[in-house]
Image: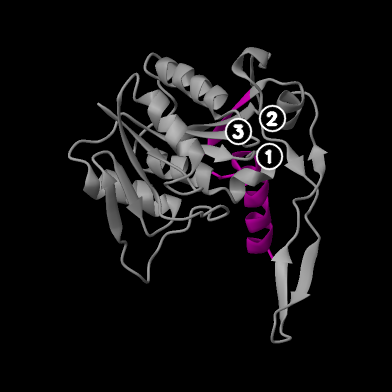
Amino acid sequence: MTILVSNDDGVHAPGIRCLAEALAEISNVLTVAPDRNCSGASNSLTLENPLRIVKLDENRISVKGTPTDCVHLAINELVAEPPELVVSGINAGANLGDDVLYSGTVAAAMEGRNLGLPAIAVSLVGSEHYQSAAKVTVKLVEQLRKHALPSNQILNVNVPDLPFEQLKGFKITRLGSRHRAEVMVKQQDPRGHDIYWLGPPGKMQDAGEGTDFAAIAEAYVSITPVTIDMTAHGFIGKLDTWIQDWETK
């Protein structure tokens, strides 16, 4: 069986190379990833242009498309048999709390799950100790071979940027949250036209015990089960009373 590896930092990024090499020790690996950095692409698909591929070597393919495109194309067209699972990463930088809404790393894993495969998104909270995140991922993959994930969930994994021996362990966490990001950076291009850059993300708002933020701050690997079904099941009954109220007037 084969593990499909993708990311949002691009096919040439050091994180995906390190991840593929580590997973190749325990499985066949196929890397299908964007030809450029697509950070922040979320779950976007390319609809108005064809997807073009370049085969870099026997097990590594570059795609002119988004992370979601890559996983969708790989599973539906580029492999003869479905992969064993999808692993997205290793992202250069954290994907904590609200970040998962925008993350192409997480989106690639979600697309694998949408197509029926177990999936993991892996991020390094920094850009140095990729080997640590790779070792963590191998351990998780070995566990996934013994224990199936629920059909509507992925694992979002964040690893402190430390040597593996300095990691304090693993914590199962929930997503924290940030304050709203309010800063935009306004500049002018050489022709005098206004241009705008997104500013830094908001500061941590919910970073208490049990959150992914707290685990990382304490040098633990954070493992968060993320549900694909975004329905607010607990609010369905309340919302139904609104409808009943409208219908009685």
Q: Nearer the viewer, residue 132 or 87?
A: 132
Please state if 184 lies on the left or on the right of 243 as rendered. right
Q: Residue at x 20, y 36 (%)?
A: 81
Q: Secondary structure at mark 2?
A: helix
Kindly indicate whether the residue at mark 1 contacts the one at mark 2 (C-beta within 8 angstroms). Answer: yes
Q: Which residues are magenta?
A: 222-249
At mark 1, the secondary structure is helix
- Which residue type does callout 3 highlight? Leu
Give the image quarter of residue 6: top left
Give the Cα distance between marks 1 and 3: 14 Å
> In the image, which disc is placed on residue 212?
2
Dot 3: within a 10 Å radius of its alpha carbon, few (fewer than 14), some, or many (20 or more) residues? many
Viewport quadrant of the N terminus: top left
Numbered circle sitting on residue 124 = 3
Residue 148: x and y, percent? 40, 21
Q: Is residue 244 magenta?
A: yes
Asked whether 72 falls inside the magenta stretch, the response is no
**Rendering coords of residue 82 (x, y %):** 25, 36
Instruction: Find disc 1 in the rendering and name its residue.
Output: 97
As shown in the figure, which amino acid type bears the numbered disc 1? Gly
